[in-house]
Image (spheres, rainbow, N blue to C red):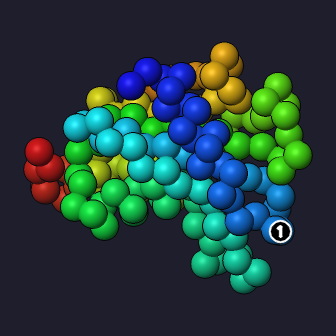
Amino acid sequence: MTDRELILEAIEARKMSYSPYSHFMVGAALLTKDGRVYRGCNIENAAYGPSNCAERTALFKAISEGIRDFDTIAVVGGDKDAKPEEMSFAYPCGVCRQVMIEFCKPEEFRVIVAKNTDEYKVYTLGEILPMGFGPADLGVNKK
């Protein structure tokens, strides 16, 4: 799957966002090592704390189905009425980055932040979470 195809999956996932408070809709598409795609969207709550980000929604969906090998995640976001040229680069929050490092190798897992299929940036998880704390810090050797 190309980066652009994965971004299109994230754009589709964004359409399912439940964001009545912030009006900032986020979609994520998670590509597994075996080629499957799991979509996620942000889901807000009036109490704020129980809200969930799009990236974690996608990861939790895959993990709950027994998937543990991930390749790339694409994230798109913007105001509910934003046109593709008005989208924002929606970087994963710290909590999402922490969840990613639990299951993904920082030097291998790719994070795409996109406004649309023409404007996007690609990073490794290690680049957006330098000096992160993960399983290896507790002596746990993940794959």
Which residue lies at the image location 56% right of the left edge and 31% below the top edge? 7
Is 117 in front, or is 55? 117
Residue 124 coordinates in the image, percent (x, y)? 41, 29
Q: Nearer the viewer, residue 25 or 138?
A: 25
Q: Label 1 is placed on what type of residue?
A: Tyr
Q: Is residue 74 visible?
A: yes
Q: Position of residue 81 (x, y in %)?
A: 88, 46
Residue at 82% across, 62% down: 22
Q: Position of residue 130 (x, y in %)?
A: 43, 37
**Based on the displayed image, in which of its 4 quarters is residue 37 positioned?**
top left
75 with respect to 72 (left or right): right
Q: Is residue 98 above or below residue 86?
A: below
Question: Residue at the location (38% across, 25% down)?
Answer: 1
Which residue is tagged 1?
A: 21
Left/right placement of residue 69 relative to residue 9 reads left
- Determine crowd level at label 1: few under 14, some 14-19, many 20+ residues with C-alpha closer than 10 A: few
Q: Quadrant of the C terminus?
A: top left
Q: Is residue 108 left or right of residue 60?
A: left
